[in-house]
């Protein structure tokens, strides 16, 4: 069926909108000539209100009567009216005349007209080269695997099951419940946020166990997971017996583990019997061992926010110590609870809890730095300085509780090759640089795995700072770098019970979205719903392994020779492989090597030396929307720049740059997301890879005997739209300094 | 200065009972100390008092003179982001301090708790009852002349006895207080200014004059932001009370000169007394009005505050009514006179234990500050 469709000859119709100021800025007649005379497009029409009823009807009539099946809309930005200009299976290509030309350049100017004409040429060429996508439909599973039976895992399982999905819940312990089942009370989760609550974990466990859609596997470990979203083959081991099943998506809710307090000897841990951790104190409270305790000093940030221990804040310890102080006060009304904190961190509603606990006359709080903990007459002496009293103080207490921090359960295990490279050199600037020797890596590997993914890039989710699996917590909080696998709860970042519950709900929804999308052959965030996927022309592959190593999502496995084995359902369609391949054997139906070369060729390079031609590759995720925002805000920029949107800067192949420069294009600008530690790249490392490839670009420039200044990469946040004119104009100025491309006219 | 710190939750509760019920709300941002127009640059208050109060650091708080430098402008409370009302906490601390230092201290404790209020009024009523059982009780006929009811000499004698007692009790309290705040401080001769320069200090007597000037002109009250009405209201009460005192002494002088009392309203002594009464009543009314109607802005105050303010108000009202009844030749004047004597007695005899004592403690603390002792401590 699809083969028949392919054979259908394309009939292109170009529709130019003259509304929204387009006809005031551009000579539309000339534009029509470009389509009909220069590019011989069979149908080309103009309309003063193309997105209106008549405009859309005009196109629909042509589809029906003229047999137009490939439509080029030369009107507004592709980011708007995409729903209006949706003509089913017909290919639609958009030419951004409104934001890209009319609103951002001088009206009726020769340069503006040339820009519009080039954009139309690009649009028509793209339409010619676009093939209709053929979704990869496989028989997929919609079962969701939840790893970890704590509060997060239980919530995720219940949410998914209540939404109608089959769930398998795997827990390594014999009982469900995790940490929360071990807490006598939890900090407030509901208004008025000022009293301790009984954790309702037991009722949730019961709910899970009674839910027919949830299969609970306790005392179970995952041996390995292979495959791809919709088709994950999971092998588990329950008491020595293995079992294999297929799932569609995975929620990783393996939680946290406490920091090793034996490293806190300077705070008396291990030295004095009555110095315990907050985890141990919780146990004392559970076992009712507090009635004889008269005074307790809680030391906040014990081994936290400290370069020698955990550099970060575990987010919950302030609340936990306030809660534990209350345990003590309730067990023994004459007791005294001291809380020595660096900063009392109780954000949002937790402030109400802090206020309520602070109101207890037996709870004494002060900011302070601990100077030492010693023993005197069977009591512990806590010495602190920098107190709110303005002087160092000492208190005698029965017990010292160290508020130790949370580590991700993934901390310290072998995750990916890029984090534990064989040569010890970590390639990415946003991954924690650590000293690695082969012996250390071997030791880490021996600690065992959690998911044990059978991926070429490594067995676990990639982690970034501090061993937490990565995601951008504002823009895409649940995404991991393994499609279909979503981290939730404390495995991802330290959080409290209510946040875990909320996080579990979000991750369950993402998992559901994933199984539904992959069933249709579509991808997930950020090109959600995209069915087009990269196709490898493997006969020409040289096994250089760039694609398999660089794919940010580990979508490509390898055979023994190093030939890539694509897993299209793992793919997020960023095109990083497309940008990486030196042989240019990777193409999408709608984003191909041929198309990009044709786009570059479509740009008219005038012979006049003063007329510069610059190509700016703009990332579609943030940079291109920012460009539209600049136009909407009336900002103007140099008209000699041709903006070419790309899926990601990672999808820009060096060969295109070389092609463009050898055709006489004067300069190449790449504008994409911020990379590095606080990256904003929607494909995690596409823009960083693009930056690294700039080395190859410089080689190319040398080979072509061109100046290095002709190519520049700029990082842009979506909020920085106002900087766009400056970025573009400065680059044009830079190219003017360098002078016109000597290849012009060849 | 390192030492074991023993927080006292009981003392925290004492301060709360004495009117500092919001003290635990403080989170030590120090907005109060920044806003306070009276707080000195060095060791500013009331931020530090708030953490001491939260920890129940009794020793520190009782020997803290800064609570008396506060004039209860309430700027701190109205700017406090947590509603901790440092102004009210300092008021409570002053009450606790008076109770701690005054002599004999077991009486003092009765002023912190309203349950003792009936007992406190019972004392002058019983004394009056004893008086009448000795000298007989009858309401005189005819023209209203108070000396026919109770001879003025008896009132004056009782007044001098009460005055002597109050003076002794207050002096003992002050002495204890002074010892506490100056322990560990030597005699201050100079205050270093840096660069080897020193400032010669005033010394106790030298500091007394500027202190009196501050009190006479109410200079500190003038600096208040939020509750600047207090400058006028306190001024009225203060000078009203002084004028009434002068007028009372004038009456004593008349008595010694053998003049019959029951002065006409045109008599200079009576004129002074009536001006005093108007000032006192006006000031009191303003204070009562502000504390009740604008309590969110100025603070309602504690029982301890109200005991003193209420007594003052009653003294003013009963005094005025007594005089009016006398001028109207109503026999009700005798009954009002009795009530007036009871409240005046209560006001005076309880001065060492009630908020009235602030006059002495605050004054001596101002001297303490001006003499450079605070800088040194």
Image (cartoon, helix red, strand yellow):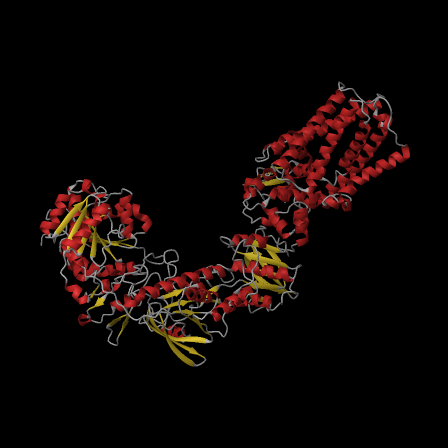
Picture layout, residue B132 above or below residue A693: above
Q: In this view of the protein, can residue B276 be seen by the observer?
A: yes
Image quarter (top left, top right, bottom left or bottom right) of the N terminus of chain A = bottom left
Picture layout, residue A566 above or below residue A85: below
| Outermost residue, bottom side | A240
| x, y percent for residue B293 | 62, 36
- Position of A304 compared to A659: left or right? right
| x, y percent for residue A185 | 56, 63
* Image quadrant assignment for residue A373: bottom right
* Image quadrant assignment for residue A399: bottom right
| Outermost residue, top side | B266
- Along the line of sight, which residue is nearer the eye, B322 or B305? B322
- Position of A630 compared to B201: left or right? left
Residue located at (40% from left, 78% from top) = A243
- Along the line of sight, which residue is nearer the eye, B36 or B196? B36
Picture layout, residue A726 above or below residue A221: above
| x, y percent for residue B321 | 75, 27
| x, y percent for residue A591 | 21, 60
Residue located at (74% from left, 32% from top) = B315
Q: In this view of the protein, can residue A660 be seen by the observer?
A: no
- Along the line of sight, which residue is nearer the eye, A663 or A382? A663
Count of numbered tags: 0
* Image quadrant assignment for residue B225: top right
Image quarter (top left, top right, bottom left or bottom right) of the C terminus of chain A = bottom left
- Position of A176 compared to A656: left or right? right
């Amino acid at each position: 069926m699809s083969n028949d469709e392919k054979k259908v000859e394309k009939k292109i119709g170009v529709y130019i909108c003259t509304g929204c100021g387009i006809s005031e800025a551009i000579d539309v007649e000339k534009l029509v000539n470009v389509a009909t005379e220069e590019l011989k497009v069979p149908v080309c029409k103009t309309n003063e209100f193309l997105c209106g009823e008549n405009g859309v009807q005009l196109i629909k009539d042509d589809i029906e009567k003229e047999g137009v099946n490939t439509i080029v809309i030369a009107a507004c930005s592709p980011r708007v009216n995409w729903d209006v200009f949706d003509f089913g299976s017909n290919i639609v290509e958009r030419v951004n005349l409104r934001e890209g030309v009319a609103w951002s350049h001088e009206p009726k100017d020769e340069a503006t007209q040339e820009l519009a004409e080039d954009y139309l040429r690009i649009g028509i060429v793209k339409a010619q080269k676009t093939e209709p996508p053929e979704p990869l439909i496989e028989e997929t599973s919609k079962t969701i695997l939840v790893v970890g039976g704590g509060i997060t895992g239980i919530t995720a399982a219940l949410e998914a099951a209540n939404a109608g999905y089959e769930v398998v819940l795997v827990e390594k312990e014999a009982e469900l419940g995790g940490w929360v089942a071990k807490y006598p009370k939890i900090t407030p989760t509901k208004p008025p946020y000022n009293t301790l609550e009984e954790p309702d974990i037991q009722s949730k466990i019961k709910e899970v166990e009674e839910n027919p859609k949830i299969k609970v596997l306790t005392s179970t470990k995952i041996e390995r997971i292979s495959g791809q979203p919709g088709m994950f083959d999971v092998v588990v081991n329950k008491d020595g017996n293995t079992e294999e099943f297929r799932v569609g998506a995975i929620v990783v809710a393996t939680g946290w583990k406490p920091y090793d307090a034996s490293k806190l000897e300077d705070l008396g841990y291990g030295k004095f019997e009555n110095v315990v951790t907050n985890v141990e104190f919780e146990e004392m409270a559970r076992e009712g061992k507090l009635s004889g305790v008269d005074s307790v000093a809680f030391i906040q940030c014990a081994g936290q926010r400290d370069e020698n221990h955990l550099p970060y804040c575990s987010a919950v310890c302030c609340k936990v110590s306030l809660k534990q102080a209350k345990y003590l006060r309730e067990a023994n009304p004459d007791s005294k609870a001291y809380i020595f904190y660096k900063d009392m961190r109780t954000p949002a509603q937790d402030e109400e809890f802090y206020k309520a606990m602070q109101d207890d006359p037996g709870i004494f709080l002060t900011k302070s730095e601990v100077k030492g903990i010693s023993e005197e007459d069977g009591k512990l002496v806590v010495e602190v300085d920098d107190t709110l009293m303005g002087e160092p103080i000492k208190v005698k207490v029965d017990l010292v509780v160290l508020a130790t921090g949370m580590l991700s359960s993934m901390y310290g295990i072998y995750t990916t090759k890029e984090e534990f490279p064989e040569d010890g050199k970590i390639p990415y600037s946003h991954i924690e640089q650590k000293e690695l020797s082969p012996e250390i890596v071997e030791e880490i590997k021996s600690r065992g795995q959690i998911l044990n993914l059978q991926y070429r890039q490594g067995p676990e989710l990639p982690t970034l700072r501090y061993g937490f699996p990565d995601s951008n917590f504002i823009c895409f909080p649940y995404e991991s770098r393994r499609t279909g696998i979503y981290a939730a709860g404390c495995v991802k970042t330290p959080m409290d019970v209510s946040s875990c519950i909320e996080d579990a709900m979000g991750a369950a929804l993402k998992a559901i979205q994933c199984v539904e999308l992959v069933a249709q052959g579509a991808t997930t965030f950020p090109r959600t719903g995209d069915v087009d996927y990269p196709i490898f022309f493997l006969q020409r592959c040289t096994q250089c392994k760039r694609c398999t190593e660089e794919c940010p999502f580990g979508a490509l496995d390898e055979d023994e020779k190093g030939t890539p084995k694509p897993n299209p359902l793992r793919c997020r369609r960023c095109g990083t492989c497309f940008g990486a391949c030196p042989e240019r054997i990777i193409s999408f139906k709608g984003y191909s090597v041929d198309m990009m070369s044709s786009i570059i060729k479509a740009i008219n390079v005038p012979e006049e030396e003063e007329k510069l031609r610059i190509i700016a590759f703009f990332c579609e995720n943030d940079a291109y929307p920012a460009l539209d925002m600049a136009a909407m805000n009336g900002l103007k920029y140099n008209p000699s720049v041709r903006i070419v949107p790309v899926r990601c800067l990672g999808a820009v192949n060096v060969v295109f740059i070389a092609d463009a420069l050898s055709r006489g294009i004067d300069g190449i600008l790449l504008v994409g997301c911020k990379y590095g530690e606080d990256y904003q790249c929607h494909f995690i490392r596409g823009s960083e890879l693009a930056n690294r490839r700039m080395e190859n670009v410089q080689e190319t420039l040398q080979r072509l005997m061109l100046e290095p200044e002709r190519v520049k990469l700029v990082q842009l946040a979506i909020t920085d739209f106002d900087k766009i004119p400056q970025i573009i104009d400065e680059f044009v100025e830079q190219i003017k300094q360098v002078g016109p491309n000597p290849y012009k006219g060849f | 200065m390192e030492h074991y710190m023993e927080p006292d939750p009981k003392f925290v509760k004492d301060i709360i009972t004495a009117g500092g019920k919001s003290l635990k709300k403080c989170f030590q941002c120090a907005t109060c100390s920044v806003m306070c127009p009276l707080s000195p640059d060095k060791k500013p208050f009331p931020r530090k008092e708030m953490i001491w109060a939260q920890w129940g650091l009794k020793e520190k708080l009782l020997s803290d003179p800064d609570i008396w430098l506060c004039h209860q402008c309430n700027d701190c409370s109205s700017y406090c982001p947590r509603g901790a009302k440092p102004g009210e906490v300092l008021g409570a601390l002053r009450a606790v301090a008076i109770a701690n230092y005054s002599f004999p201290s077991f009486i003092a404790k009765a002023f912190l708790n309203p349950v003792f209020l009936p007992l406190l009024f019972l004392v002058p009523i019983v004394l009056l009852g004893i008086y009448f059982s000795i000298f007989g009780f009858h309401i005189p006929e005819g023209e209203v002349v108070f000396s026919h009811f109770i001879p003025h000499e008896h009132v004056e004698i009782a007044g001098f006895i009460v005055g002597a007692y109050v003076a002794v009790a207050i002096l003992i309290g002050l002495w204890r207080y002074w010892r506490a705040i100056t322990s560990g401080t030597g005699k201050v001769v100079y205050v270093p200014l840096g660069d080897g320069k020193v400032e010669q200090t005033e010394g106790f007597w030298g500091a007394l004059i500027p202190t009196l000037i501050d009190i006479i002109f109410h200079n500190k009250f003038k600096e208040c932001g939020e509750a600047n009405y207090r400058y006028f209201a306190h001024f009225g009460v203060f000078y009203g009370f002084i004028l009434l005192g002068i007028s009372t002494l004038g009456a004593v002088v008349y008595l010694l000169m053998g003049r019959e009392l029951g002065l006409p309203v045109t008599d200079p002594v009576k004129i002074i007394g009536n001006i005093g009464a108007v000032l006192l009543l006006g000031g009191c009314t303003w204070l009562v009005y502000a504390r009740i109607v604008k309590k969110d802005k100025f603070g309602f105050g504690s029982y301890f505050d109200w005991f003193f303010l209420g007594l003052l108000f009653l003294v003013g009202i009963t005094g005025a009514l007594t005089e009016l009844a006398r001028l109207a030749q109503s026999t009700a004047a005798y009954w009002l006179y009795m009530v007036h004597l009871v409240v005046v007695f209560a006001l005076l005899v309880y001065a060492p234990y009630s908020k009235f004592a602030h006059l002495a403690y605050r004054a001596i603390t101002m001297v303490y500050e001006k003499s450079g002792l605070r800088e040194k401590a």
